[in-house]
Structures are given as C-alpha cells and as structure tokens.
Amino acid sequence: MKTSDHKKQTILAALNQGTFISGQELGEQLGISRAAIAKHITALQDMGVDIFRVNGRGYKLNYSLPLINQNKLNSLWQQQFHTDCPIEYHAIVDSTNSELMRRLQSDLNMASGHVLVAEMQQAGRGRRGRTWQSPFGANLYYSYYWMFDAGMQAAMGLSIAVGLAVYDALKVLYGINVELKWPNDIYLNQHKLAGILVELEGQVEGPCHLVIGIGLNICMPESASKHIDQAWTDLQTHIGSIDKNQLAVQLTHSLSERLVQYKESGLKEMVSQWNRLNAFKGELVTLSTGQRQWCGICEGIDAQGGILLRQDGELKAFYGGEVSLRKVTS
C-alpha cells in the first residue's frame, strides 16, 4: 500500500469513531503537519467521503463508513471455516474485475475462489460499458475468480447463479428478501441494490477463467446519485449499520456454494427459485439491444437462463449479451 493511502486510511479510521478530531491531533498521530492533514482531507473529499470541518473543533464524518479490515476478514473466515481466508483487500483499485483479469495474464495458477475487495474503484465498470459509481468506503466492490472446466458456452447462465448467491447472503445475514432482475441486477423494494458483471477468458468448450464482479450499495452518498440513471437504494436505508467484513465473508461462502451447484447440475435446481424472485414477474417490459427492441410480458427464465417474453400469446426466449430489460411505465 502506498504511504499516502495508508495515511488516508489512518485519518479515516480516526474520523470513523464518530467524534470531532482536530488537524493537530491527526498530525501528531501521523507525524505530519496540519497542512499535510488538510491536503489528505481534501483528497478524501474528492474521493466522495463526506467530511466537514467546524472551527475550534476539527474534522468529522457526516456519517460513519463501513470500512474493511484485512485482519477482521481473516479472523471471521477462520472462525467460520477453519481455513485460510481467500479474500484480499485493497484500499483503492481501478476496478476489482480489471485487477483480477490482469492477474490472469501473469498468474494462470491463481487459486479458484480467490476474492478481491476494495474501498474504492477509480474506474468501476458496469454492463454495456457503463461507469459503476464507486465512492470511497460507501459500498462493497467485490470480484471472485473461478476456473470452470466446462467452457464459456456452458457458463452462459452463470449470472443466474450469482444473483441467487447474493440473495442467499443477504437472507442469511439480514433476513431480507431481494428480487432478481434479468440478467444481472438485484432489486430491493423495486430499486436497484446491486449489479453483477461476469467476464470470461478461455475456450468455448474447454477450460475458461471467469471473474465475477459484484457491486453492492451499502451507504451510497446522495452526491453520487446524480450520476445514476435509475431508481436505486442501499442496505443502510433498510438495515441500519452494516459490517462490510461480515458481508464479504458471507457473500464469498454463498457464492462458492452456488458455483459448486452450478458446476454439478447447471441451472436445473435454480430456475424455479429464480422465477419466484423475478422482479418483473408478469410485468410488461421492453428488451433492447443496440439495434432492436422487443416488448412483451415477462414470464421468467428458461432452463438455459434465457428470459421468456410472451408476445401475442407466443412465448419467446432471449439470451444474454449487450441487452437491457426495462419495465414499461405508463
């Protein structure tokens, strides 16, 4: 970790105690000047951290941040599963998916199940080339590497399994029931809570490498919402305080279990459950690509993970790619 990043994290940890702390106190902790502290504070504000200052009292966070701690990740994992923790933490990356994809170029022996989480993405990516809003400390930015022997063609329905894994983790930890929107979104109370980005590299029918990215809103600041083009929500709004370390551990476990299930039986045991959680069940929707658009009643997914639309009494299946599914609003 860069020295400057370490100093920013130390400042954030101090501010995250919930009380005012002066620039002088922070400077004494870090062995740097008050002017240097002010520069780090400005840099954190530029990253989207909501810090304010009151003369005579010092700095304070407008709200607490659910920060990740590598030692806590390790401890939680070992307590539950008695093995070495597969989760690697970074403060800032360009994109957790991009970082793992780069690793594949130099380390083809990377262990399947390796996870990378970060506090901030400087170039977070969503589907269809969109930017994924990734303010520092606010949300969970998560990527999971998986080696799949059956090939890219057999991985076609993988986002279905990943969506169910997110459902599993949130149900276990918080007792909430999210809904799933084909092909890659998680909804809560008809607002987007999380998104999935699966990237593949390898052979059509031979071994392939998959990087499964998940961005999950935890305490998204309003300042970031102006860049989001659809209704959204975050966990803190519904649950209150969130331990992001616990969430990353449970998500990794739930995802590992769903991937084993997918490897053994594909979507056979998942289709009916996904259809019960379908956010657009029975709704009039439009499905769009860059060139064409279809309209119909959303009937769920088929055995291969394709979306089923009923048009003029006929059921038609559509599969993944650069597609967008939206509900028709009056």
Image: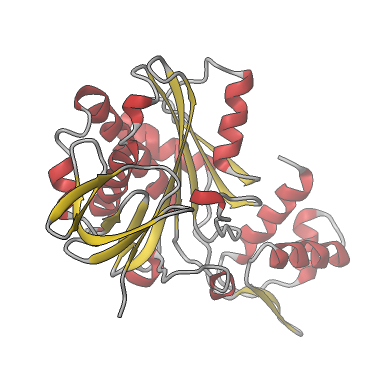
Does the image show residue 135? yes
Question: Image check: 255 left or right of 62?
Answer: left
- Among the 4 quarters of the image, the one containing residue 97: top right
Q: Position of residue 169 (x, y in %)?
A: 29, 48
| Image x and y of residue 230, in percent | 44, 69
**Residue 117 versus residue 207 in the image, above or below:** below
The tally of labels here is 0
Rendered image coloring scheme: secondary structure
Residue positioned 32% across, 25% down in the render: 154
Looking at the picture, tell me which residue is in the foreground, 215 or 242: 215
Residue appearing at x 30%, y 65% in the figure: 188
* In-image side of 131 versus 37 (left or right): left
User: Which residue corresponds to the image point at 28% horizontal and 53% vertical from the top-left?
Assistant: 173
Of all residues shown, which one is farthest toward the bottom?
A: 55
Q: Position of residue 319 (x, y in %)?
A: 32, 42
**Residue 82 in view here:** no
Q: Toward the viewer: 318 or 217?
A: 318
- Residue 202, given in percent of the width and then of the height, sits at 48, 20
Q: Name the image quarter holding the C terminus.
A: bottom left
The answer to whether residue 166 is left or right of residue 96 is: left
- Compared to residue 208, the image places residue 9 above or below, namely below
Q: Quadrant of the N terminus?
A: top right
48 vs 73, nearest the viewer = 48
